Image (cartoon, helix red, strand yellow):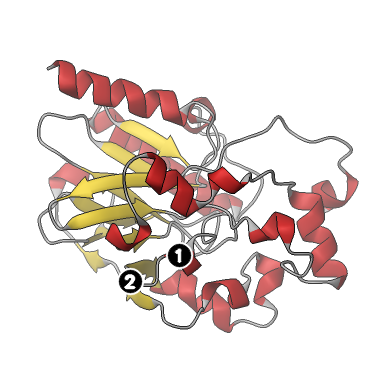
Amino acid sequence: MWWLMTSRKWTAPRPINVYVIEHERGLVLFDTGQDRDSVTDPHYFPKGLSGHLYARLARFTIRPEETLTEQLRGIGYEPHQVCTVVLSHLHQDHIGGLAELGQAEILVSAREWAGLDTQCPEVNGLLERHINLPGLRWTQVTFAAVDDVTISPFAAAHDVFGDGSLLLVPTPGHTPGSLSMLLRQEGMAPILFVGDLTYDLEKLTAGRVPGVGERRALLESTHEVNQLHRMYPDLVILAAHDPAAASLLAQALEARFAS
């Protein structure tokens, strides 16, 4: 809070990444980005002290062609083709495309969803009127204990399709219910989507955690991710706001198609 109220300069611009996975069961999204209404609608954010904090936290630039729908169309898809959405957490720069995805099943951790029932959830970054929209199909995920040596740093997981290709694991810290998703596909390096656990892979590897969140939980989740990385040196770790993520993903895809 002290940092938020006293800072005098902005960081360099960072992306808001939405990841698209082609699965035989249908198209999957990891996170949904930022709603363009947040820069065009003066009533999008709360007023008063909460609104002041949101204005201090970030400034957004979202052009008409950068909405979720237009970005999907740019790679040959329509929103109605998305069957499953996985949300790393419920902050407003991850839930912005929900209104465009009324046909999809939306997965969020039960612990994260419980944050909506707290007093003044917007103070914790949860804008309920942009989350709990009519017509959406929500599934609250709980993590079952697993005895799986292939993900041994994590003692619990949720298998999205039951085929081991997409595993959700709890990585609390940035928010109490934050989760990550491990993608495993034959002939390709495993990929771990970590949301806002880090903003920079180099800092993650060094064990340095962001300032937003609960530090002890962030350190524990970072330790588990780094353990998994040591198990799989070719593991590709993709964060929501890491400027290097796009090139890391491109390299992984090139390696797959070159093999």
* CA gap, disc 1 and disc 2: 9 Å
Q: Is residue 133 left or right of residue 247?
A: right
In which quadrant of the rendered view does residue 46 lie? Answer: bottom right
92 is higher (above) or lower (below) than 255: below
Please report the residue visible at 45 percent of the width from the left and 30 percent of the height from the top.
Answer: 245
**Quadrant (top left/top right/bottom left/bottom right) for the N terminus:** bottom right
Please report the residue visible at 61 percent of the width from the left and 69 percent of the height from the top.
Answer: 126
- Give the residue furthest to the top: 258
Q: Secondary structure at mark 2?
A: loop
**Quadrant (top left/top right/bottom left/bottom right) for the C terminus:** top left
Residue at the spot of label 2: 103
Three-letter residue code for mark 2: Gln
Along the line of sight, which residue is nearer the eye, 60 or 162?
60
Q: Position of residue 170 (x, y in %)?
A: 37, 58
Q: Is residue 100 visible?
A: yes
Q: Secondary structure at mark 1?
A: helix
Along the line of sight, which residue is nearer the eye, 256 or 156?
256
Q: Residues within 10 Å of mark 1 (few under 14, many from 20)?
A: some
146 is higher (above) or lower (below) than 154: below
Q: Position of residue 59 (x, y in %)?
A: 75, 46
Residue at the spot of label 1: 100
Q: Position of residue 81 (x, y in %)?
A: 28, 59
Q: Is residue 74 left or right of residue 57?
A: left
Q: How many marks?
A: 2
Please report the residue visible at 34 percent of the width from the left and 24 percent of the height from the top.
Answer: 250
Along the line of sight, which residue is nearer the eye, 113 or 203?
113
Three-letter residue code for mark 1: Glu
Q: Is residue 220 visible?
A: no
Label disc, if present, on residue 231 of the rendered structure: none
